[in-house]
Structure formats: structure tokens, C-alpha cells
Amino acid sequence: MVGASELWQQMRYLMPEGLLLCAGLVILLFDLVVKKGRSLYPLAMLATAGAAALALLPLESSEPLFFGMIQSDAFARYFKVFSALAGFLVVLMSMDYKPLPARFVGEYLGILVLALAAIMLLAESTNLLMIFLSLEFLSLSSYILVGFLRNDKKSKEASLKYFLFGAMCTAVMLYGFALLYGASGSLDLPAIKAAFANRQNTPLTCLAMLFILAGFGFKVAMVPFHAWVPDAYEGAPTPITAFLSVGSKAGGFAVLLRVFFTVFPGLDYHPYWLAVVGVLAVFTMTVGNVIACSQDNLKRLLGYSSIAQAGYVLLGFVVMDGRFTQPAVMIYLLAYLFMNLGAFVVVIVIANTTGQEEIDDLAGLSERSPLLAWSMFIFLLSLAGVPPLGGWIGKYYIFATLVKGYLEGLSGGNLMLWFAVALAVNSVIAAYYYFRIVKAMFFEHARERMARPVVGGPLLTALYVSLILTFAVGLWPQPFLNWVSRMALPLL
Amino acid sequence: MYLLPILVFVPLLVAVLLLLAPRSTSPNLVRMVALVASGLIALWSLGLPLSGARVDYSIPWFSAWSWSVNFSLVADGLSTPLILLTTILNFNCVLYSVGVIRKSEPAYYFCLFLLEAGIVGTFLAGDLFVFYVFWEMMLIPLYFIIGIWGSEQRIYAAVKFFLFTLAGSIFMLLAIIVLYNQTGTFDVAALAALAPRLDPVTQKWLFWGFFVAFAIKVPLFPLHTWLPDAHTQAPTAGSIMLAGVLLKTGAYGILRFCIPFFPAAAAEAAGFINTLAVIAIIYGALLAFAQKDLKRLIAYSSVSHMGFVILGCFTWNVPAISGGIMQIINHGISTSGLFLCAGLIYDRTHTRQMKELGGLADPLGRLTGFFAIMMLSSAGLPFLNGFVGEFLVLLGSWKNSVWLTVFAATGVVLGAIYLLKMFQAGMLGKPAKSEYAKLRDIGLRESLALMLLVIPAFWIGIYPKPVLSVVEREAAKIEKTMSTALPSGTSMIEGRALWAVADERDVQD
Amino acid sequence: MAEYLGVVIFLALVGIVAGGGLLVSNLFGPRNPTPEKLIPYECGVDPVGSAKERHPVKFYLVAILFLLFDIEFLFLVILAIMFASPQLPLTRGLLFFELLAFLSILGAGFFYIWRKGALEWD
């Protein structure tokens, strides 16, 4: 029998998300009392910063906690830090986001903070039920946040599309969970692993794997579950777009890593996995990149770009070798966090200035605001994977993982080299549309009556933090690499 | 010991300082800083030949999961002349630009210094990873230089330039990663020993992965189409750096990586590549002949002249290789001189169309003199630098293949024709417009910029020994690599047949 | 799969009995419709207006809130049953405090909707 003291001991590992959950409730309740939404920003910032600090404490346990529902290991801690950091930056970005109705700021912040806690829970769940619950927790909060601009038709449409798509994918995923339960007789990931140890792949497990991939693929914006992305990204309040593109995507990748590294290695399933995920990843990045070329709306463009980026990360999964896949995926996500959030900061400033988010609104930005133009340029370069920036380190490790998989003669190795070639070709396509933005900023002249963008303190802070860390990951990657390799799942 | 890092990081530092300079900084201060900094960097680079045949510097950069990268820089006989060329040309560009550029100057000099850092880093890199970083780094500033300060079609040219080179380099990245995983090191010196031992098929793939990236940069026919656009649209300084050193990074890469790492694959490909080089020589010359635009003509002459470089690099005897390297240096001097002259003419007449020029010899006496010297040096007149390289390449190539040499030699003749035609159309004859009579001749600053190129042109032409001895040493190294990789007594052009023999021998074993 | 055969047979029988009754009464039952018989049955009172009228959206809010709290109270039933169970995986004191925590979060939610005015009709 588990006593209070023992449970209390286990609670230590849940401090970051506990703090966020409490903060979320407190913000919601405070909102009733104070009525002044803006005064809640410091509270949300404090909560996210505090959660990041708590997550940085070396409190890890490889033991299953709370009756096997949760495993708060280093891997989970990595994503806790990640999500708290992303949350902090998103809160900063929201402070100066004009279209956000001041009346509802309390609700907005409360739900945002709860969504961050959901990502943390998602990253540490080791039970199918718990995974489902936290995934739904994250999804439901996201639906509300996407539709938060209730007087904006696009926002409402985005929310509805996101919801319908999400419900569909979640249902399919749930079916996959059911099949997995049927095949193994347990909901606990370690127990499922034990049940599968050295067993042949059966159609049932294959089907379960595919269905589960649908649910997680929806979260990370994998083709063919990407259709919600452009509309949701365009309609959502821009800070929420930024949050979706890094936070909820990272959550999806975390759970993808955990489930697929825990459950399936026991099975002899590698060839299927390689073909399915590799081809999906190539489709994901190609579709994202090709369609992004014809986008004129910045948020849509970054939306398609984030689909493509998900494709790059997914390629890391193809190898499915514990030594390489996880660090590659994790370092890529880290670099992606800063560069993508940074790009969205610039989009927010532009939207605040001109009221819309078209590429044309960036015309002549280098003359109107050199700081913004050069920062955006750095973020885009990093997204395009140009050295020596963060995105390049990420892309390098994805490449290296594929090559390693190829050379170590994993089955279907030749395919991996082709995947690497596909990644290379896609990088060139991506450079084309990222440089369309650069072209607008530096080579074109501002239209008449285009105001000089004003960057307030919070946005400036977010901009600088993203900028410095984008550079840091690229120029001095050692500490980040060390950290990531320490935080990888000890699974294979 | 800090000789090399300073050479890379000081330009970087100056660049960042210029970018962060407050808006209120006076343009004069910016120009002064740029001028002094680039001059000092050029002087500092003179320390390279003075401090021995080989200088190196290395610190660990990062390592994780069995990949480790050292930040290592090496200067040897191959890179030292090219670095000198880079720093001097950069000073030259700044010297020219302070009088011309008036649009967002801090950003302009930022780009120039970033470009310098990138190119110097590329030549210095002693680690493939570092090489790649610098290789990509030099793309960005040139993209901006063309795109912001270029002429009418600049955006198209900038994007084309960027996408072409990026497409090439991303496959080189793939090749670098494969190479690392096969050998366990990024170190260039170690790879030169390890890489040739890889199996022939891998070598072949890796060779092409590297070669395509370099061939785009050189540029080798048929990958040259970005060059005329980029050159024509770039501002003068951009053209100078592009023709003077950026193209050389491609040739440098071939000599530094492609050939020493994959001698067998290089031998196999040599016949094909040499044919392409000769096609480039003749094709470039013919197209240059047909151009009406001054800068476009010089751009196509680059395609032709760089063909000689490739021909020299892929003909493995000492005269040809040293001729190839000499041609790299000479083309850097002559063509940037030509572009500088073309820029100075354009600044005065505001046209690059040769039919709208003419009769400039009268008002622009000094410029005409310099232009003539540069033109003759490019045409390969004896006692000027261009002659040395082309002569050696043809000499070496003769031993290899008579037919290729004969065709390549027609390039020299054609070169003389189109260059003389250019000079005649531009400077001699009747003025196309009456107001040309009132043009102002070049002043002290511009003369100084040109003198910086004329002096080495004469020096190499009359007394090439100091440069040639260094270059020959490098050429001998490459020749030795090739001759140890392949059994002696075989001409390189028969490399293909040789592999067949080797395969049979393996079978017998 | 053989052990499920009984279930399948059972399901088939259920279908036959239920469907058969309807089918038979539909086929053989007398039919004598009058206008009075065809109007909707509303406890013997004549219906007023159409049944397809618009309801205030507030009904849905109330219904949703009711459902939420209803389901959450369902958990209390399970906890209450478990409280006496000998296989309880944790101590009873702990369970009691967990219950309290659960209820207080529930209470906070209740407070929230109350203050937001979700329970007021106008």
C-alpha cells in the first residue's frame, strides 16, 4: 500500500507541471476577481519561468511513478524545460499582441499555462490512458486558444477545422491504443514492451502502430495529417501559432519517441517502420516546402515551413537507433524552438504595425527597422539550415543519423541514403521561399505610408533571447549537445 | 600562433562592429574604419609567407555521439597565395568603394568584411566541417552585395546565384558526412591519407559529391549559367571579389579535396572533366566574343579562363598542375583588374554597352593605360602574368593529350581576339557621345587600386620564380599523390583502363 | 474465437425476437389512422405550434455543465466503493485527502462558472 509520505515523495517529480497547473487555476480564478487582464501577465511569466527553473533541478527518477502512469526521467525533464521555456517566450510575445481582447487575457493565459502543463504530462506518460488524457488535454486547450479571437471569422474557422481534424485523428489513435491493448493485454508501456519481447510482427501490431502514428502525426503536422496546419496557423492569434508550431509539436515528438522507443523495439518491425515513416517524412517535407513556395501570407508560409521541418525531424526517426535518433531529434527541436519563435516575434511586430501578415508587409524592412530585418534574416537562415546557426547543427545531426544508419548496414540502408538526398533537395527548395522573405526585406522598397515598426520591451526580450540562443546553438553547440545527450531516453 | 585565427576573426569582428554601428555614425568614419581595417588585414596576411611553409592552429570545437569537430586552420603553399589575393583584393574593393557606394554604407562594408572572413576561412580550413561552415558563410554576403547594390536585374541574379551554389554545396555536405563516417575524421591532412583507401565505388560517389559543388563555383561548363548574370548585375566590388577569389574557392576545393582524397575516382573522371574544361575554354571564348555588354564579356572570359584551371588540375604532371594554380592566381589578378576598369568606366559613362562606348582613350588616358595592361595580361601576353599559367597548362597538357591541347590553345587565340575587340570598342575609335570628352580621368585613389593589381601582374610575368617555386612544390605533392595512388608508367588519362586491371588483379587474388 | 460463438448466437436471437415482433405487428396489425391519432402525444393536451422551434443556447450551456459535474461525481461513487475494498493500493487517509483535493478543484470550477455568470439565466 502506498502511503501519503511515499506519494508525497513522488510529487517532487511533478513540481514543474504542478506549479503550472496551480498557476493556471489561480490565473483563471484571479481573472474573476481582478478583472484587469494585463496584470496577470507577470503571474504567467513567473509561473513559466518558475516551472523552467524547477524543471532544471536534477530531479529524475527512472522508476515508474503513480502506479506506472508516469515516468519522470531525464527525457521527460528535457521536454519540461523545453515547454516551460517555449511558454515563457510565448507569454512575452502575447503581451504586445494587439488583436488579443484585453477582457479575456485571464482566460487566455490560464489556458495557455494549462496547455504547457499538458505538454509536460504528455512527455512523461508511460501509460496509454495517461497519454491519451494528456494529449486530449493539450488538444482541447489548443482548440480554444486557436479560436480565441472570437470576432475574427478566420480564427473561428481555424478552431473548428482544427477541432474536427483533431477529433478524427484522436479517434483513430484511440483505436490504435485499443488494438495495442488487445495484442499485449496491458496499458502500461513497459508491460506492453515485455509482452512484445522477441515476438514476430503481426498485422495487428502493424495496424496499431499505424493508427497510433496517425494521432501523433496530427500533433506534429505530418502529411497526410497536416491539412489543419495552414488554416489553424493563419487564423490563430500569432503567439498561439508560435506555440502550436513549437510547443505542441515538441509534445507530439516527445510522445512519439517514447512510445515507439519503448513499445516496438521488441518486435522485428524495422523494415516496415523504415518504409512507412521514411516515405511519410519525405512526403511531409516535400509537400510542406513545395506549397510554401506559393504562399504570400507569412503565417501560412511559416505554417507550411513547420510542416516541412516536421518532415526533417521525422527523418531522424527512420533510423530508430537509440544512440542517434533521439539526440538528433532533440537537438533539432531545441534549435527549432528558438529560430521559429524568433521568426514569429518578427511577424507579430509586423502585424502590429501594418495590421496584416503578408510578405509584402515586410518590404523594405531593412530600411525601416534594421534590427528586425537582420534578426528575421538570421532566423530564416537558421530555418534554412545555413551554418553556423542553430538550425544547421540540427540538420547536420539529422543528416549524420541517416548516413550512420546507412553505413551501419541497418536493413533498408540504401533507402536511408535516398532519404538523405531527399532532405538535401528539400533544403534547396526551402531556401527558395525563405529567401523570398529576405528578398522582400532587403531588396524591395517600402510602400508609401508604411510605418516604422515599434518593438516594445517584452517582444524585444523575446527577440533577443531567440536570437542569442539561435546563435549559441550554432556557434557553441557543445553545452547543448552535452545536455541533450544526457537527457536522451535510456531505452535502447 | 594566433596568426591564422586573427586573419579570420578580425574581418568578422570589423563586420559586426560596422553592422552594430549606430545610425548616426558619419559615413566618413565608416569608410575610414573599413579602409584602415582592410589595409591592416592585408598587411597582416603578409605575415603568412614570412612565417614558414606551413602554419596551423587547432582547438576542439564540439563533439557529441561519436562526431567530433576541431576548429582547425592550416595555411600552406596552396592557400597562402590565395589568401594574400583575397586580402589584397578586399583592400582594393574598399579602396574603390569608398568613392562610389553611397547606399547604406555600414551594411555594405559589413558584407565585404563578412565575405572576406568567409573566403579566408574557406582557404584556411583544416577541417572539413569548418570548411563547409565558411563555404556557406561566403554565400550570404555576396547574395546581399548583388541583391542590394547591384544593377537592374539584381534580384534575379542574386537568387539564381544563391540557389545554384546552395544546391551544389548541400550535396557536398552529404558527401562530407559520409566521408566522416567512413574514416572517422574531419581533419583534411588525415583524410588525405585515409580517404584514398576507401573502396572505388564509394570514392566515385564522394568524388562527384564534392566535384559538383566545386564545379558550380568554378564554374565549369555546363554549370556556369549563374555566372554571367551574377557578374553583370553585381556592383564592381562584388564582381571583383566574385571573379578574383570566389571562383577560386571551387578550384581550391578541387585541388585540396577532390584530387588528393579520391585519386582513383579523379583518374577515372579526368578524361570526361578535361573534355568539359576544353569545351568551357572554347565555349566561353566564343560567347565572350558575341557579347555586347562589357561586364558580360569579361564574365564569359572567366568561364574560358577557368577552363584552363580545370584542365591544369586534372592533368597530373607538375607543369600542368602548377600552371593550373598559377592560372588561379593570375585570373584573380587580371580579371578583377578588368572588372575594376569596367566599373570605373561605368561610373563615368553609366553604360556597359560597348556600342555606346568608344573613344575613351582621349579623356581617360590613365585608365586606358591600366585597362590595356589588364587586358593584355588576361590575353596571355608574354612578360605579363597571364602567359605563365596558360603556357604551363598547355605544356603539361601536351604530354597528356595532344588533341585536347590543340583545342585548348585555340582558346588563347580566341581570347586575344575578343579582348582586343573589347578594348578597341571601349577605348579606341570615335566617342559614341559628345559628352564623353568632358569625363574626369581616374584620380590617385583609383590609380592606387589599379596599381595594386598591375604590380603583381608584371612581377609574376617577368620574374615568376618566387611564386612558381611555392606553387611547384604543391603541384609536386599532388602529382606524387596521383602517382602513388596509381602504378607508375601509366598515363592518367588511362585511369579507366587501369581500374579494369586493378579489378582483375583483385579477382586473381 | 469459438468461445464467442454463444455471444453471436445470443445476438442473433435478440435481433430475431425484437425485429420479428415489430415486423409481425407491422404486417398483421390493424391500421386505422385518424387526425387525432396522428398528432404528437403531449399528455393528452393539444400541442401548440411546431415542435421544431428554436431553443435558447443557454440550455446547452446548462446541459454541458450538468454533464461535466455529473460525470465528475461519478468518480466519487467509484472512490466511495473503493474506500472499503481490501485491494486498495493506497492508504485510506491518503485516499481521503485525494478526495478532498479532487473536490476542491471541482469546487474551484463551480466557483468559476458561478462567477462567470454561467448559471444565471438572464
Image: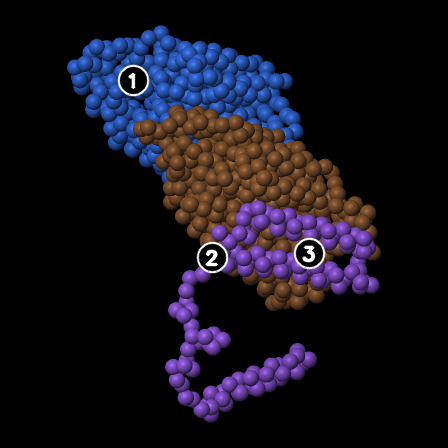
Chain colours: A brown, B blue, C purple
Q: Is residue B147 visible?
A: no
**Taking B41 as reference, is A477 left or right?**
right
Please state, as top left, top right, bottom left or bottom right, where the N terminus of chain B lies in the image.
Answer: top right
Q: Height in image: A371 above or below B28?
A: below
Q: Position of residue C118 (x, y in %)?
A: 54, 51
Three-letter code for the amino acid on which mark 1 is drawn: Asp
Residue shown at 51% from the left, 31% from the top: A459
Residue A90 location (% of width, % of height): 55, 38
Mark 2 — on which chain does it sit?
C
In the rendered view, does A360 fall on the left or right side of A91? left
**Residue position for label 2:** C57
Q: Quadrant of residue B156?
A: top left
Q: Secondary structure at mark 2?
A: loop
Disc marking residue B408? none
Q: How far apart, in angstroms, are the residues tagged by discs 2 and 3?
A: 38 Å
Query: What residue sits right under mark 1 in the picture?
Result: B347
Whether residue B297 is situated above or below residue B215 in the rendered picture: above
Distance (Cα) linking label 1 and label 2: 75 Å
Q: Nearer the viewer, residue A40 or B500?
A: A40
B211 vs A50, left or right, is left
Q: Position of residue B312 (x, y in %)?
A: 45, 31
Can you tell which mark lies on residue A127? 3
**SS at mark 3 in the image:** loop
Residue at screen point 34% across, 26% down: B150
Q: Residues within 10 Å of mark 3 (few under 14, many from 20)?
A: many
- Do the residues marked 1 and 2 share a common chain? no
Front tag of 2 and 3:
2
- Between A293 and B397, the one lying in front of the other is A293
**Relative height, residue A94 to residue A152 (above, below):** above
Q: Are marks 1 and 3 in contact (CB under 8 Å)?
A: no
Amino acid under label 2? Answer: Val
